[in-house]
Image (cartoon, rainbow, N blue to C red):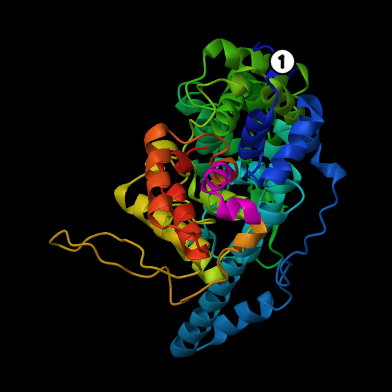
């Protein structure tokens, strides 16, 4: 296995890297505190996050709806016009709630006491990609989000079982409709192909047998809960991944997690998320050994990853394109700024390519270089201007039939709070251009600018003469528009 990082290599830069990847970055004083702890204590502080109380209140509506049955009854007895109006009212209600839910989660990421827990919840959201567009119930999306958070760093089988019985997932992959007369194979296939094994490690017969074993796992739309319906379960003999008997859904999940590929699959996914793609197979095998020896528990695996020399290698540091959520949340944290209002945050993430609670398909977001298109990059630059100046500048969008660029606003909000210069820069840093450049490098990049970029920034600052706040704000915008700022 990759050796642990030596104490001599633990410094401000490596601490910044840990906070960027195991969380959403932070301002210089947070990085310094982490660096002062030393590697082992810094990793423990992030991974053992339950030691920090999280008193975030759930949204007011995030609970079973006692009026739900009444609304269903009204819908059944309503006229066609009344039914349409009731449906429009429900759609408005759910639309408002999902905007609120996105902001609720972004606030947890940006200011909550457990950055790794939220970073893991984001991983699981992409891994078990489920969309509001089909689920159509913000409460169920919140409930799934809480499931990700509750089991984020726990046991693999426990997580897989919880998500298999999650109401949003039961709806999303049609498991709620599966019954012994007509087993639905959607979830049975995806739990192996996308969630736990990958292609080539099961047969079509395994899909069929797993679907039979999972019949009876369903959803009660009135109580909004998972329900086991024994009368819908196929109780006949089955053979799945080499195991035969009167198998149930729990038997299927146990057999999947016991498969040799199941450990390698999820370990590789986590390393790709936190470190880099295309890791040497030997490294993945070594981390998988740690995972298996610790009973498929994620915490020992995460500690081994975050303490490894490989995690801090030159090929990993600043090699990962920030996802839109990482870009927005880390920018807010580095700048010690406020999140944009809910509608604006939601619209901005959609324009950047990562609409929370609405992944593009069951595979989730592609990530990596797929985040960087011409339009998405221009939208990042314009969102940077919004965060820094408070002015809602135009955001570039796709062109018309002649290729001309249209220029919509992020939404109809014209101003937000903007950046407080005296909160992030001392008087000396604001007056002294050398000190200003060093301070901005430390805050925004945790690394030095390339010579060419530093010269361009210095030329701009020199051309302004005595600097005022607007000059400094523009300098920050320039740094946030560099290729380096798009990487973490």
Is 398 positioned to the left or the right of 286 in the image?
left
Question: Compared with residue 454, is residue 174 higher up or lower down, i.e. above or below?
Answer: below
Is 374 positioned to the left or the right of 268 in the image?
left
Task: Indicate yes or no whether the magenta region holds residue 428.
Answer: yes
- Residue lying farthest to the front in this orientation: 465
- Which residues make up the magenta segment? 425-439
Q: Residue 363 location in percent, x, y?
A: 46, 41
Q: Residue at x 83, y 43 (%)?
A: 50
How would you classify the magenta stretch by its main secondary structure? helix
Q: Quadrant of residue 159?
A: top right
Q: Quadrant of residue 430?
A: bottom right
Q: Residues within 10 Å of mark 1 (few under 14, many from 20)?
A: few
Q: Secondary structure at mark 1?
A: loop
Q: Residue at x 48, y 44 (%)?
A: 364
In the depicted view, which residue is nearer to us: 151 or 43?
A: 43
Image quadrant in which the N terminus is located:
top right
Q: Residue 192 location in percent, x, y?
A: 54, 31
Question: Compared with residue 8, is residue 436 higher up or lower down, i.e. above or below?
Answer: below
Q: Which residue is mark 1?
A: 6
In the depicted view, which residue is nearer to us: 418 or 410?
A: 418
- Residue lying farthest to the left in this orientation: 402
Q: Is residue 386 visible?
A: yes
Q: Residue at x 15, y 62 (%)?
A: 401
Question: Compared with residue 36, is residue 110 higher up or lower down, i.e. above or below?
Answer: below
Task: Indicate yes or no whether the magenta region holds residue 422.
Answer: no
Q: Residue 74 location in percent, x, y?
A: 60, 84
In the depicted view, which residue is nearer to us: 266 or 281?
A: 281
Q: Residue 169 location in percent, x, y?
A: 59, 50
Q: Is residue 167 visible?
A: no
In this rendering, the count of numbered labels is: 1
């Amino acid at each position: 296995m990759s050796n642990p990082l030596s104490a001599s290599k633990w410094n401000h830069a490596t601490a910044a890297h840990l906070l960027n990847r195991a969380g959403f970055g932070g301002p210089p004083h947070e990085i310094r505190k982490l660096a002062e702890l030393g590697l082992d204590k810094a990793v423990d502080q992030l991974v053992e996050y339950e030691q920090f109380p999280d008193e975030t209140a759930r949204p007011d509506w995030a609970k079973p709806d006692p009026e739900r049955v009444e609304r269903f009854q009204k819908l059944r007895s309503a006229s066609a016009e009344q039914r349409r109006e009731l449906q429009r009212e429900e759609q408005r209600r759910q639309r408002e709630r999902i905007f609120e839910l996105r902001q609720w989660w972004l606030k947890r990421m940006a200011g909550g006491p457990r950055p790794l827990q939220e970073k893991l919840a984001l991983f699981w959201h992409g891994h078990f990609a489920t969309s509001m567009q089909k689920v159509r119930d913000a409460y169920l999306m919140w409930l799934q989000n809480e499931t990700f958070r509750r089991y984020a760093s726990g046991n693999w089988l426990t997580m897989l079982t919880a998500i298999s019985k999650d109401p949003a997932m039961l709806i999303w992959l049609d498991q709620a409709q599966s019954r012994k007369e007509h087993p639905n194979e959607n979830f049975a296939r995806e739990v192996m192909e996308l969630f736990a094994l990958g292609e080539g490690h099961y047969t079509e017969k395994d899909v069929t047998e797993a679907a039979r074993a999972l019949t009876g796992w369903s959803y009660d739309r009135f109580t909004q809960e998972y329900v086991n319906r024994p009368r819908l379960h196929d109780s006949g003999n089955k053979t799945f991944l080499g195991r035969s008997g009167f198998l149930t859904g729990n038997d299927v999940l146990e057999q999947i997690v016991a498969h040799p590929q199941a450990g390698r699959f999820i370990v590789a996914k986590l390393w790709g998320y936190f470190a880099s793609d295309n890791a040497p197979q030997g490294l993945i095998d070594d981390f998988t050994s740690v995972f298996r020896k610790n009973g498929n528990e994620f915490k020992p695996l995460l500690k081994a990853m975050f303490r490894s020399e490989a995690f801090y290698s030159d090929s990993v540091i600043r090699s990962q394109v920030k996802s839109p959520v990482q870009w927005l949340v880390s920018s807010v944290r580095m700048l010690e700024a406020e999140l944009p209002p809910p509608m604006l945050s939601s619209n901005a993430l959609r324009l950047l390519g990562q609409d929370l609670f609405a992944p593009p398909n069951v595979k989730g977001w592609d990530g990596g270089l797929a985040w960087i298109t011409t339009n998405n990059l221009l939208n990042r630059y314009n969102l940077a201007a919004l965060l820094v100046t408070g002015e809602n500048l135009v955001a570039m969008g796709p062109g018309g039939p002649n290729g001309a660029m249209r220029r919509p606003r992020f939404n109809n909000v014209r101003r937000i709070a903007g950046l407080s210069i005296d909160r992030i820069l001392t008087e000396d840093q604001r007056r002294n251009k050398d000190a200003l450049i060093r301070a901005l490098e430390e805050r925004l990049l945790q690394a030095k600018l390339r010579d060419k970029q530093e010269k361009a920034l210095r030329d701009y600052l020199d051309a302004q003469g005595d600097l005022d706040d607007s000059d400094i704000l523009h300098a920050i915008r320039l740094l946030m528009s560099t290729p380096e700022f798009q990487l973490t």
